[in-house]
Amino acid sequence: MNIKPLLDKVVLKPEDAEVTTASGIVLSTAAQEKPQFANVVAVGPGGKIDGEEVTMYVNVGDKVITSKYSGTEVKLDGEEYIIVRQSDILAIVE
């Protein structure tokens, strides 16, 4: 099954959080921070949103940094995804 985002939405696949600290301490899943790095899986077409034209700046395959608690988490076919507005993406990692 595929996810096809609408308007200015972007589908992200979050990267796994670090499970050990720099000093070697293993973190439980409850103590891990929510990942901020993600890979772009699908991008909406953009268009007119609230009367303003929105141009999409991210592409499928880009690695991005998002706001910590933004978007909607979705589980599809056993995979976890986050659907965010393009404005919730802070930067593209090159």
Image (spheres, rainbow, N blue to C red):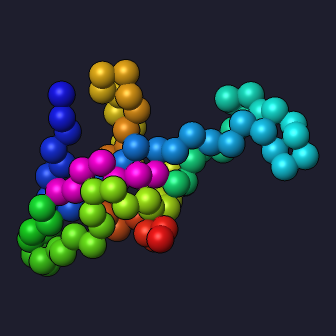
Residue 35 higher or lower than 43, as above or below: above
Q: Quadrant of the N terminus?
A: top left
| Any part of residue 13 in sight | yes
Q: In the visual, does 15 lie left or right of 82?
A: right
Residue at left offset 17%, top offset 74%: 54
Percent from the top left, x then y, of residue 50? 14, 70
The residue nearer to you, when weighing 24 against 7, is 24
Instruction: Locate residue 25: give its quadrant.
Output: top right
Secondary structure, magenta segment, majority class:
strand
The residue furthest top is 78
Residue at left offset 37%, top offset 38%: 81
The residue nearer to you, when weighing 61 against 70, is 61
Percent from the top left, x then y, of residue 79? 38, 28
Q: In the visual, does 59 lie left or right of 75?
A: left
Residue at left offset 12%, top offset 61%: 45
Residue at left offset 34%, top offset 33%: 74
Percent from the top left, x then y, of residue 32? 69, 38
The residue furthest bottom is 52
Q: Is residue 42 magenta?
A: yes
| Any part of residue 88 in sight | no
Instruction: Give, as a single range, the part of the protein colored magenta.
Output: 38-44
The residue furthest right is 23
Residue 62 higher or lower than 26, as above or below: below
How many dots with numbers? 0
Q: In the visual, does 20 lie left or right of 73?
A: right
Percent from the top left, x then y, of residue 84? 34, 53
The residue nearer to you, when weighing 79 against 9, is 79
Residue 49 higher or lower than 12, as above or below: below
Q: In the visual, does 90 lie left or right of 17?
A: left
